[in-house]
Amino acid sequence: MSTKGHGIPEKSYPNIRDYNYTVVKAVIDDKEYFLDPTDKNLPFGNISPVALNGEARVLNFDKGSYWQRIIPLKKAVKRTIVKLNVSQDGEITGEMNLIKGGYLAHSVRTDYNEWGEAKYKQELEQSMTNIVFDDYSIQRLKDLEKPTSENIVFTIDDINKEEIVGRENTIRFNPILFEQLTANPFTSDERKFPLDFVFPFTNIYTVTIDFPEDYKVKSIPSDYEMTLPNGGGYYLLRVQSKKNQITVFAKLNMINTIYSKEDYFQLQELFSNILKVEKLPIELEKK
């Protein structure tokens, strides 16, 4: 194999210098597995992300050699489940459960084991702007075959309280408090090469918001959905209001690993629209 930093192997003629990585292909009960002993945080059948570089050359000493595309055994899925409670004075407290599987769980385990709990927790809290961790715990860190699960009890930072509570008895805040896209990664006016996402992934965000009975919903974001051509992926946002509770569901599903240069402008439009819809606030008004 050749790692991403080493480049793509030349297919028209053999050159041993094109390769710098080796894994074992095992066939067990007619099912194929790729075994990579270089990383203790990898589950069985997955190889290091640095080696997810398109096709590998399989050396079969009985049948010769051939090309084979390497597909991750476990899908990368992240679920963010949030419960928020809005008080009379606009203070927002909540609980969050981060569940990560596949290569996303591998990233958690790698960082946690390398940095230690204190630094990992600090880096995670800094990545989530505007909140303060009141409690943090993590489960299934050593069970490589299962997703990691992180539980966080938090409070919205008081520095943003003035923005949350308006002057006219209005509570205003963004429902996508976490996992929000901050910038469009696709800013160029042209694209000459395919795009490599390393692995397909799915991000699912669910938040339930409870607010005081003497408040009513003034405005909520509208539902939104966009699908990429040729079944390459989609994004959807659903917002529902019932009595004193609002539920928000957002999902980004990137189905392909490689997107052609012709797909670039559709990806650019998709992420531009995600930026817009995830900035729309929820407004609660005192009755």
Image (cartoon, rainbow, N blue to C red):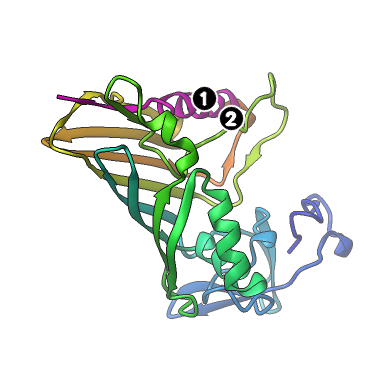
Q: Amino acid at mark 2?
A: Asn
Task: Give how far apart the Cα atoms at labels 2 and 1 are.
Answer: 6 Å
Residue under pointer 1? 272
Q: Is residue 221 left or right of residue 185?
A: left
Front residue (pair 275, 39): 275
Front residue (pair 127, 205): 127
Residue 100 sits above or below residue 200 on the image? below
Residue 20: x and y, percent?
81, 66
Q: Which residues are magenta?
A: 264-287
Who's the residue at 79% across and 54% down the image?
Answer: 5
Q: Amino acid at mark 1?
A: Ser
Q: Secondary structure at mark 2?
A: loop
Identify the image quadrant of the N terminus: bottom right
Residue 267: x and y, percent?
54, 29
Who's the residue at 46% across and 64% down the image?
Answer: 74
Residue 78: x and y, percent?
43, 54
> Which quadrant of the figure has residue 151?
bottom left
Identify the image quadrant of the C terminus: top left
Q: Secondary structure at mark 1?
A: helix
Q: Is residue 74 left or right of residue 21?
A: left
Residue 101: x and y, percent?
45, 63
Residue under pointer 2? 184
Q: Residues within 10 Å of mark 2 (few under 14, many from 20)?
A: some
Q: Are discs 2 and 1 less than 8 Å apart at CB?
A: yes
